[in-house]
Amino acid sequence: MEQSKLWTKEFIVNALINFFIAVNFYLLMVIISDYAMKEFGSAPSEAGFSASIFIIGALLVRLFAGKLLVRIGYKATLALGVITGLAMTLLYFGVNDIYLLLMVRFWHGLSFGITTTASATIVADIMPINRRGEGIAYYSLCPILATAIGPFLGMFISQHGSYSMMFSVCAIASAISLLLVPLLSLPRKELTAGQMEEMRGLKLSNLIELPVIPIAIICLIVFMSYSSIVSFLAVYAQEIDLVEAASFFFIIYALVVFISRPIIGRLFDAKGENKVMYPAFVIFAAGMFLFSHSHVGYQLLLAAVLVGIGFGAIQSSTLAIAVKMTPSYRLGLANSTYLMFSDIGMGTGPLLVGFIIPFIGYRGMYTVVAVVLLACLFLYYFLHGRTANYRKHHSARRASEDRAA
């Protein structure tokens, strides 16, 4: 494969698998609580847990997904996740009480964690070294597109169809992913004796890629900040009387991400991560500050533009950084570590900001989030930015050694 070629068959097929898995996830996420309350008479707390237990399953399995990728290979791990995901999706048809639903959701989360970790590792491994920023930017557009299509399908079918129809659409999406897996041509990674010895045994360094933790901490804080919008946008919009404008927030956000992310990816490859990350923190913080002080619709939508540019740049760039600083045989661990921290951020963010809302209100809370993002400028500098140039040369040399091996 030519080193400069990005749009290979494997890249496209893997991105499509990721897209259909994400559609399944987002479609179910928007309707599962409503399903639990209407079908089983569950309390709101139980119904909400049916959504969050999925994330718990995904988070737990990421601890072992990286090691699994090394042990049985990328393609086999991906196939395992996709097959299990399809099986769990089909089980929704037979669920007849809340406890069985919780069990299915947990196992479905496990399959999602395996699949997404494997898919991210595959794309990091097959893309050209000098185009990883651009490649990850394009690849990460798939879940962005799914965030628009999945919830739209869920809301549309809930109004005009049935839950069985929703489960059928999800099963079709999973089945398409499974049909795509055999199209991937991925040679099994051959490890040296020293690498095999390093990966042997159950120890912390074989569950988490320790050098990735500093950039993953940045990722965790950024995802916590973004989760405050996802979780409380509807309530905040009602409070400030901008419900109509808020209904377009994520549409504008998705459009901006689609336009800006490939450009940001090319800038990342050409100029390095610092040229992307420092402005991105400022733009994201500015978006959150404008969001917190919006009084008319155009201000809220301009905030969506700034959030799309800032958060979108940080999201794809932190993953590219994690991949760039990791030896090829440990990419699975790097991806599972990164995704685990992002899951923690998305899961704990609403809880943490929820504690401060009663004291300072929604506007105050979003202002605090903006300040936290500005503080990330300094945290990023100390955790990664000040050594980025050294890491760039070190990573290039290691990549050359990997290819020679």
Image (tube, grey):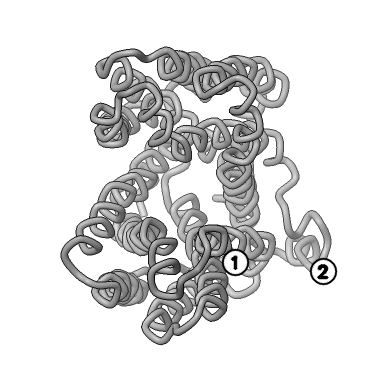
Q: Position of residue 192 (x, y in %)?
A: 70, 64
Whether residue 306 appears in this view of the structure is yes
Q: Nearer the viewer, residue 80 or 400?
A: 80
The amino acid marked with disc number 1 is Leu
Q: Which residue is mark 1?
A: 69
The amino acid marked with disc number 2 is Gly
Q: Position of residue 71 (x, y in %)?
A: 65, 72
Q: Which residue is mark 2?
A: 201
Query: Mark 2 or mark 1, which has the lower sequence index?
Result: 1
Residue shown at the point (61%, 32%) measured from the top left: 353
Element under disc 2: loop
Instruction: List the single residue furthest toward the left.
Output: 160
Residue shown at the point (25%, 63%) measured from the top left: 158
Element under disc 1: helix
Q: Check disc 2: other Cα within 10 Å, few if <14, some if 14-19, many if 20+.
A: few
Which image quarter holds the N terminus?
A: bottom left
Residue 78 in the figure: left or right of residue 138: right
Q: How much space separates mark 2 and mark 1, taking CA atoms?
A: 15 Å
Image quarter of residue 195: bottom right
Residue shown at the point (47%, 40%) measured from the top left: 231
Q: Position of residue 214 (x, y in %)?
A: 70, 34
